[in-house]
Image (tube, rainbow, N blue to C red):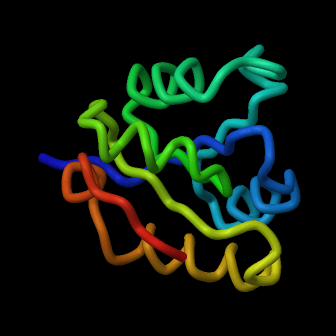
């Protein structure tokens, strides 16, 4: 049986997104909480994979890693400042409501 989506924010993502997701009852981690402040994109990807979490990012480098074939449990990407924090939160909540974790493995969701 497939599980619900869980998220991990990378360093460049506004922490208000984590707060908004948590207020909707969604499991999300931040770099500060898991000791990843200042760590590389690869370290964030490894952590997210170890927890089977979708990585939320504004970082193009993570898209490059994904396209090079690095395994991931899903990447949610939005270009920095392209959308409001509230809009990103609403989109991630919608994704949580309609997609199961297994369905996101290896996929990139452009927000």
Residue at image position (44%, 67%) is 96
Q: Is the C terminus in the top left, top right, bottom left or bottom right quadrant?
A: bottom right
Q: Percent position (x, y) of residue 94?
A: 49, 80
Question: In the figure, is residue 46 to the left or right of 23?
Answer: left
Farthest-out residue, left? 1
Relative to 54, does residue 44 appear above or below in the rendering? above
Is 18 on the left or on the right of 73, as rendered? right
Position of residue 31 relative to residue 75, above or below, is above
Viewer-nearest residue: 1 or 63: 63
Residue 87 on image: x %, y %? 71, 85
**Up-down: is 97 above or below 11?**
below
Indicate the position of residue 43 as horizontal and vertical percent values: 57, 18
Snapshot quadrant of residue 32: top right
At x 79% / y 81%, what residue is drawn? 86
**Residue displayed at 58% across by 52% down:** 60
Q: Nearer the viewer, residue 100 or 12?
A: 12
Q: Position of residue 25 (x, y in %)?
A: 63, 59
């Amino acid at each position: 049986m497939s599980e619900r989506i869980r998220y991990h924010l990378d360093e460049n993502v506004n922490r208000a997104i984590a707060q908004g997701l948590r207020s909707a009852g969604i499991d999300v981690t931040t770099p500060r909480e898991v000791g990843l402040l200042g760590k590389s994109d690869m370290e964030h990807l490894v952590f997210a994979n170890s927890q089977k979490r979708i990585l939320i990012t504004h970082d193009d480098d993570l898209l490059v890693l994904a396209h090079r074939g690095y395994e991931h449990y899903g990447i949610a990407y939005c270009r920095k400042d392209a959308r409001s924090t509230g809009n990103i939160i609403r989109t991630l909540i919608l994704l949580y409501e309609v997609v199961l974790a297994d369905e996101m493995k290896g996929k990139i969701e452009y927000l």
